[in-house]
Image (cartoon, grey):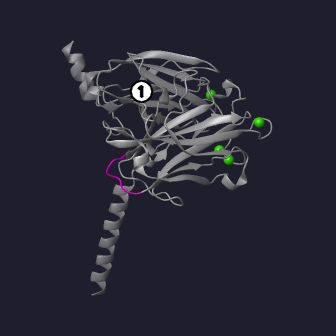
């Protein structure tokens, strides 16, 4: 009898752990689980672009599936600029404003200005749902602040993704320090409870690399129908190793990398086999010597000059190079 109870307990525990695994969607954290990026970074507007942020703001979009019922929160980890995690320049004097937008005008596929890529054009489209300014504040140092609760229907509906879209803007409104932070989409303000099927994306990624010469960070642009080539642009990479593009088709194409305070760009052909999947942009740090606190910016556009989305949870999963496709291609020649 005792043995049977023990087996029953083990069975229940295994079922519970499988359930937890299934609902543990990686898409809820920004940067995402597969990206291996420690922080997003936004400097105060009086900062130097040579510190790795070219425009002193960042924009992320969250997609909430239409069939999700209930409320949710957009949590910001370490929203303050001071204490732990952040990048000090002189004294702490930066203020950062986080603003959440919903409603018509947010969807960046319908409203290009919402992407934040057009110089001088207002990207604060949609209805302002919540906003808060953070400075050097121990209350929020190394801790979460939760915006919300929000109802999914407060977002801007996108038919293609069958989801409501929300936008969070982070602006370095004053000072010169770097704010390092992360986002988490949660059903609960005080714990991390993911929303099944939700995702996050941006068009221009400004992030911090690990201070570890062995680390590889990733971002995953989605290759939509009709794309035949992409132009990659990276900023202030500080000659920190190599950037490789990997896909089911590409074993690893290295792209030109930027140095201090400049952009490097190049064109990359896209194959039919890569459509409807994600590419894997891999950031391999220099092995010989550590480039400390490296902040970097990357953006992509297709052959028509239209910006590509980077999803925190790669659409179609992390692409794995399949050598057999390459061999077939060679044999055809
Ligand atoms: Ca400062
Ligand atoms: Ca902090
Ligand atoms: Ca911070
Ligand atoms: Ca840099």
- Residue closest to the far top: 333
Asked which quadrant contains residue 214, the reply is top right
Q: What kind of secondary structure does the magenta stretch mostly adopt?
A: loop
> Does 101 sit above or below residue 330?
below
Residue at x 41%, y 27% (from the top left corner): 308
Above or below for 284 versus 13 = above
Tell me if 118 is positioned left or right of 238 in this view.
left
Residue 293 appearing in the image? no
Image quarter of the N terminus: bottom left
| Residue 126 belongs to magenta span | no
- Residue tagged by mark 1? 308
Q: Quadrant of the C terminus?
A: top left
Residue 193 position, x and y percent, is 45, 58
Image coordinates of residue 315 in percent, x first then y, are 35, 38
Q: Give the residues drawn in magenta, as a range.
A: 65-70
Seen as rendered, the residue at the extreme left is 332
**Residue 128 found in image quarter:** top right
Name the residue located 50 percent from the left edge and 33 percent from the top edge.
125
User: Which residue is pictured at 50% across the width and 43% down the height?
Assistant: 30
Judge from the rendering whether residue 92 lies leftward or rightward of residue 119; answer left or right: right
Q: Is mark 1 within 8 Å of ligand 4?
A: no
């Amino acid at each position: 009898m005792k043995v049977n109870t023990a087996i029953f307990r083990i069975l229940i525990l295994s079922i519970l752990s499988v359930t937890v695994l299934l609902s543990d969607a990686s898409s809820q954290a920004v940067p995402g689980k597969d990206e291996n990026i420690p922080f997003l970074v936004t400097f105060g507007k009086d900062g130097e672009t040579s510190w790795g942020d070219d425009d002193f703001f960042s924009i992320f979009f969250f997609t909430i599936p239409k069939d999700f019922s209930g409320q949710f929160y957009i949590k910001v980890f370490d929203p303050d600029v001071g204490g732990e995690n952040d990048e000090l320049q002189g004294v702490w004097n930066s203020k950062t404003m986080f603003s959440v937008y919903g409603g018509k005008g947010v969807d960046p596929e319908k409203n290009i200005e919402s992407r934040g890529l057009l110089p001088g054009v207002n990207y604060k489209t949609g209805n302002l749902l919540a906003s808060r300014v953070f400075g050097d504040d121990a209350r929020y140092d190394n801790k979460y602040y939760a915006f919300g609760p929000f109802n999914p229907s407060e977002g801007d509906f996108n038919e293609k993704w069958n989801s409501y879209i929300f936008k969070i803007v982070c602006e370095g409104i004053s000072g010169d320090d770097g704010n390092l932070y992360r986002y988490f989409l949660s059903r609960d303000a005080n714990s991390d409870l993911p929303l099944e099927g939700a995702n996050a994306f941006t068009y221009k990624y400004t992030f911090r690399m690990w201070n570890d010469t062995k680390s590889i960070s990733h971002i995953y642009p989605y290759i939509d129908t009709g794309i035949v080539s992409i132009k990659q642009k990276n900023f202030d990479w500080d000659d920190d190793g190599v950037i490789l593009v990997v896909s089911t088709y590409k074993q690893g194409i290295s792209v030109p990398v930027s140095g201090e305070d400049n952009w490097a760009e190049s064109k990359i052909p896209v194959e039919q086999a890569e459509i409807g999947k994600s590419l894997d942009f891999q950031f391999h740090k220099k092995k010989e010597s550590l480039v400390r606190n490296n902040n970097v910016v990357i953006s992509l556009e297709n052959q028509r000059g239209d910006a590509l989305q980077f999803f925190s949870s790669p659409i179609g999963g992390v692409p794995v190079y399949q050598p057999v496709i390459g061999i077939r291609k060679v044999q055809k020649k």
